Image (tube, coloured by chain):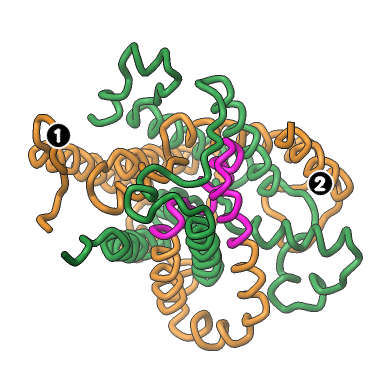
Chain colours: A green, B orange
Amino acid sequence: MNSQRVDTRSSRRSGNWRMNWILGGILLGLLNTFAVATYASLGVSRNYVVVPNVLLRVFGSGLYESNAYLSQFPAGADWLLMLALGMVIGGFLAALLRGGLNRRSVPRLWRSRFGSSRPRRFAAAFAGGFLLLLGARIAGGCTSGLVLSGSAMLAVAGIVFSITILVSGIITARLIYRRKPS
Amino acid sequence: MTMTAYIIAATHVLAQAVSESFPGAVGGTDARALIIGLLTGIAFGAILQRVGASSYEMIVNMLRLKDLTIMKFLFLAIAVGSVGMYIVDATAVANIGIAPFYLLGIVVGGLIFGAGWALAGYCPGTALVAMAEGKSDAAITVLGGLAGALTLSLAWDWVRSLLIDPLNYGSVSIPEVIGTRPLLVALVFAALLVILIMWLDRAVHEKEPEAGGKPGLMKP
């Protein structure tokens, strides 16, 4: 089990300690059960619509009411929006308490293939984010709402979406990291 | 610290909107719902960060089939969640809302999402966590995500008539299709996932050289 190789005493001291995926998987499954028992299942991508809605409302634009898509969503805080805010805080605290923040802008693996250019990495990161939310909002969910929660609820949409994103992601990753023609 | 200012500013904006109710609100807008939502999110973000799901390398190496840690983590979380949710459903009130299945939108959306996943190395949730960790490319992914969501809102009528309305089967689930009790299906589904996880665990290890080299499932 790969994560256990990382979990050595020396890496623990240097702050690279990672939670075993088995423990993490059980905890996340229980957390989703708790979420469903209390309010709703875990989901994220809808908040990429709600945050612009909140901002449009705060800055007095009526677009969030007149647009046929935006008006389907809240322009204020609910359980699901607070979940996303909590994720930011939780990620921040977990990193801070276990080895500190990571201020790198170009991932190591990306650098090994495409060099250390920040604009290049940022362009890919932006395009990637654009496609992620375009696709997620067409399908009605992301890795959280459709894969983690939708599949667990045995929704046909969740299972078909999970298989599709894995196939598409694996093909795209192979194209991005294909061997350089020599 | 910029991140603290970030959180304070975001909380301030949210505080203005607290306790207002809107159509489409999920999970409630009362103070208790907001606090539980926040705490659940903190746990969610911390688990993702600790397991390494907010790491570009872990996501991309999963998609390159070189390190399946995150895939196994995700599948196990689905298995545990499935059984957990349907135990709650069988004994108490569970807020289970089945996502609607519209074939074209799910597949086209999934294909677009998968490409973005491999390009960004984050998904919408792990990008938030990675941004909070200080990774600036993840913050750019979040900005790209906001732009993508807004672009969809401008093209909504077109997308809806083309991808959402045709071949729309509504909120359909596997237990419904085969006409069996959901908890029974969840148990079988979880067992199949555990078998898949064990197979993935072994498949990668068998192909993995003892030292150095490039481990992988597929031959180049």
Q: Is residue B179 visible?
A: no
Image position of A94 with respect to B99: above or below: above
Q: From mark 1 to mark 2, how far is it between C-alphas?
A: 49 Å
Please identify the quarter of the rendering in which residue A39 is found: top right
Magenta residue check for A132: no
Which element is circle 2 on?
Answer: helix
Name the disc covering residue A77, or none. Answer: none
Magenta residue check for B122: yes
Please identify the quarter of the rendering in which residue A174 is found: bottom left
Task: Name the kind of residue labelled 2 in the image.
Answer: Leu
Q: Which of marks 1 and 2 is nearer the N terminus?
A: 2
| Chain ID at mark 1 | B
Magenta residues (range): B117-145
Name the disc covering residue B212, or none. Answer: 1
Image-based side of B17 in relation to B183, left or right: right
Residue annotated with mark 2 = B14
Q: Nearer the viewer, residue B5 or B26?
A: B5
Q: Which of marks 1 and 2 is in front?
A: 1
Quarter occupied by the C terminus of chain A: bottom left
